[in-house]
Amino acid sequence: MLGLMSNSSELEIKLDFKGLCYIYLSTWPYILAEIKHFAALLIMTLLLIGFGTAVAFLGIDVLWDTVGRGEILSTGQAKILFLPADPYTGPELLHEGARQTVLIRFLILTAIFVVITSTCNVVIRLYKVWILQRVNQRLRARMVSNAEELSLRSHANASTGDAIYRVFQDSAMVTAVVENIVVVPVIGIATLAVQLTIASLFSLWFGFLFFIGILVCILVLKVITPRLQALSLRARQASASLFTRVQETFQSIQAIKTYSFEDENYSRFFTESETAIDTAFDLRRNFAFVKIVCGYTLVLVLFITDYLATQYVLDGSTVFGASLLVIFGLSVTTWTVAAHQARAGSLMMSKLTVEDLIRVWCLAQDMSVGLNRAFWLLAIEPEVKDAEDPQPFPNLQHGISFQNVSFGYSPDVSVLKNINLNIEVGEVIAIVGPSGSGKSTLASMLLRLFDPDEGNICIDDEDIRSIKIESLRQNVATALQENILFPVTIEENLRYAASSVSEAEIHAATKIACAEFITKLPYGYNTELGVGGALLSTGQKQRLSIARALVRDTSILILDEPTASLDAETERRVISNIKNWAKNKIVLIITHR
């Protein structure tokens, strides 16, 4: 079913900032459907980060100043550690026993905090995965639904493997968008703002130097981004081509073995597999280059700030924004070792956050290419659509008429030209012609799998383009030229398009199709057919296909090469049975003989 894409027809969206915004905004409807869950996830994550930050600052203050130097606790710190005010908040330095008590209390509290935060972190991660999978499911379902809406002309140059890759791999980028373009940047920017504010309150030089480092990283990203996008497209096209090769190998395994083509097919697969690996590795190598350059830049900034902070400690300088640092749980007025470590922790977290944002930007280029391929399918408008006010299928009384119908799969290749045909109710009509003459195409237009380029097809003088597509197809049954069977039981195959029919109706249809062989199978109608009906002969598959069309009991029946694989006697019986069944109906038989 899926298989309408070709790389030459990719939707052209320039992946500059405007193009990226367009692609990512296209994911919004799928994200919006889960917006309540995303809001809850964001709140839970920010609360956990805030809790962890507060605990970290508490630990630095308690361990360095109170346990290490014997300084008294603040009233709030004493309450958190469940310690009395006297002597822990008193005017004098703490003695050795009191410091040991503070340490033990702090370690116990830390263990409790670790259990709580670890549990919450696991719950949040599972919740996030659940939300993202729901978003991906919505996009995949929409892609397949849109593919089903397209006409067969859109599927003419099919690449099934590429289509499957788009649905399962490229569409998965929507979950990465939510996490890496929405969640991570929002949390990362908020975290970076807080941590740089804290660092700047220790000294404005720290914020300024880090800002310079960020500007250098932005310049590197600006230069390399176009290359990342080009490499990502090459990698995805190579992987999709490999996916197609695998799909075609298993689909054509009989032909490969019959013509002793195993070595040549393996060679082609190996070459395409190497190409896919090389292009993917080339992309990752460029990711690594960005990470190294930006990482070294930020490390240099940290070295400079470490030097400045050490000088402040040695000089006993006053902390620039001491009064405001209290807001973040830091009670420091002069530069101490504890202040030095708190500042280092803040800047290190800033560095890690910037590196994470750089990683996200690199991934965003790959995601944009993947989503561009995924949304290509959604951007295709179906050629065959319902009219603005579609009508139900008419009560068939007269017949079908093809009036000057012309059709071509491409503008320069005409398949049918000025076809005129009238079929009355009760008639069994055979359309005979050589292979490739357009017989199946003519029948497909009756189902509106295509619309004619010129002319009209009418049922009881009503143009079928005015009939609701669903209603039209519910009243036209087809036995396809290719006997498509599913790897389920015979009965489930027969019920595929008519799930509510009774067993008696199923048995009646198989009798008309001369499918008596079913009762001779070990499990009768409950026999599993295997992939593609592998357990049946071609003639048996053909009779099941006819029975599946008959069981729907529609006003119009199309049989495309229905007896090509049947012996002469079985063919005569099937056609005779269909003629007797077809009173007050229309049967259109397509055959080359």
Image: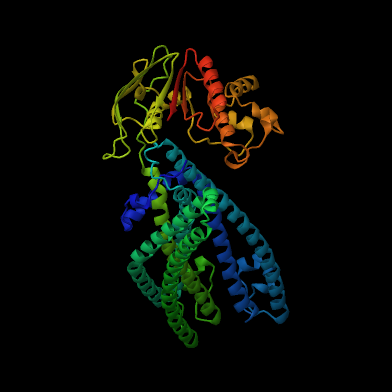
Residue at the farthest bottom position: 314
Q: Quadrant of the C terminus?
A: top left
Q: Residue furthest left?
A: 412
Q: Which residue, as the protein is rendered here, is positioned at the far front? A: 568
> Is residue 323 visible in this depiction of the protein?
no
Q: Is residue 368 above or below residue 339?
A: above
Q: Could you tell me residue 111's position as x and y percent?
A: 69, 67
Residue drawn at (71%, 81%) of the image: 96
The percent coordinates of residue 202 (x first, y second) are 45, 75
Position of 117 compared to 385: left or right? right
Q: Which is more toward the observer, 331 or 215?
A: 215
The quarter of the picture where residue 18 lies is bottom left
Residue 12 appears left or right of 35? left
Quadrant assignment, res 207: bottom left
* Whether residue 340 can be seen here: yes
Exactly how many numbered labels are in the figure? 0
Nearest the camera: 408 or 202? 408
Question: What residue is drawn where x is 40% and y is 35%?
Answer: 435
Residue at the location (48% across, 54% down)?
245
Q: Nearer the viewer, residue 550 or 131?
A: 550
Residue 218 at x, y = what percent? 36, 69
> Which x, y percent locates residue 3?
44, 45
Residue at image location 55% in from the left, 48% down from the top = 254
Relative vertical location of residue 15 with respect to residue 549 in this rendering, above or below: below
Q: Nearer the viewer, residue 114 or 518?
A: 518
